[in-house]
Amino acid sequence: MKTVLITGITGQVGSQLADYILENTNYEVVGMMRWQEPLDNIYHLTNLINKKDRISLYYADLNDAVSIRKMIEDVRPDYISHLAAQSYPRTSFDIPIETLQTNIIGTANLLEAIRQTDDYDPVVHVCSSSEVYGKAPADVTLSEDTPMHGASPYSISKIGTDYLGRFYGEAYGIKTFMTRMGTHSGPRRSDVFFESTVAKQIALIEAGFQEPVIYVGNLSSTRTFQDARDAVKAYFLLLEASAEGKIKPGDYFNIAGEESYNLREVVDLLINLSVVNNIAVETDTNRLRPIDADYQMFDNTKIKNVINWKPEIPTTQMFKDLLDHWRKQIFNGRIPLNR
């Protein structure tokens, strides 16, 4: 039976990839996490984890090369989906060194551990980001060959991650591939991301924990959206395609939604889903980035030439599910920070 190692399993995407694998295959899942991470996104799996019923956890840290090497030697997974990262672009302006250290050196630690393990030839998915394209020119459809342009310490760290994955594939023949996922959302999306903090604030307003005012940053950005539950299916299909030799080591793919919105439209859509009338919207300068990726539209041709995949969950359903996620959190007494 094959084993899939998911670094960053406690995140939205990592936890949903685990769900997809458990529901659609007979593979084993090992989730890497730091011991003190919150388990909110995997509580529904803890009974299976406790029984070691096809899923287990391994405590390690990307910034601790010894722990990463030991994990690879102990687990020797067939597939690795490397999702762990400091993944918040806005936060990266406040903690640039940690962002660069975790995302670049942490990825190097993982790839080196794989390279130095004898008689070991896994498939390795390195999660990059559409943020590598940064402040791309308006009205340009982003393909995999669009020049990279770092617009935050996070995007710069992901450029480094992207190049590392490519290098280890081309130089050492490790079966790596990189994915550059566009904006994705849905249940479990962290509240530091735009559409999730808007949905969270609406849920707080509905529950009486916030005045009927939503605070936002830049609303001029236009981008595609997709449900992360669609994206993890693409991740898994690419893992299998690589194992079958359909992807050359070091290759890279955009994965993006096909429905686009201006962020003002996103705010209006979520407000229209609320049971509260007359919610106001105000700009909070603390939520603005020094540089922003104002326009992101993608070409999915390359990935569709390799796997049979397309986004299936409508974004309207995705936004509704996101709002319902925050309503449920608050109903269960988990009052989120107003940030």
Image: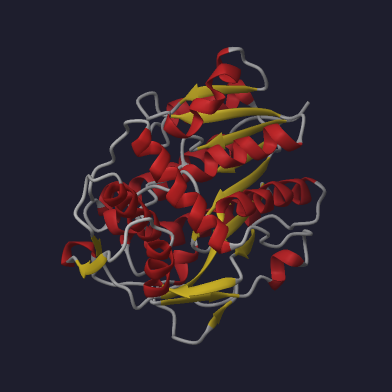
Is 102 or 311 nearer to us in this picture? 311
Q: Nearer the viewer, residue 258 or 205?
A: 205
Farthest residue to the bottom: give it: 139
Structure colour scheme: secondary structure
Residue 266 x/y as whole percent: 42, 68
Q: Nearer the viewer, residue 144 or 191?
A: 191
**Residue 338 appears left or right of 78:** left
* Above or below, 94 relative to 337: below
As rendered, which of 76 and 223 lies closer to the eye? 223
Image point (41%, 65%), residue name: 272
Q: Can you say which quadrant of the picture contains the N terminus?
A: top right
Task: Give the residue at the far top of this rendering.
Answer: 51
Residue 108 visible within the image: no
Q: Residue 167 in the image: x percent, y percent?
A: 57, 56
Q: Specify whether 59 is left or right of 72.
A: left
Could you say where residue 253 lies in the image, as x and y percent from the top left? 63, 63
Q: Is residue 244 above or below residue 80?
A: below
Badge count: 0
Q: Is residue 200 visible in the rendered structure shown here?
A: yes
Residue at point 79%, 59% (across, down): 308
- Residue drawn at (39%, 44%), measured in percent from left and top? 326
Using residue 297 as the reference point, say whether residue 191 is left or right of it.
left
Q: Looking at the image, which residue is at 77% across and 29% down?
A: 26
Where residue 120 sits: x, y (%)? 69, 33
Tell me if residue 232 comes above or below residue 195 in the rendering.
above
Which quadrant of the structure image shows residue 275? Answer: bottom left
The answer to whether residue 29 is left or right of residue 138 is right
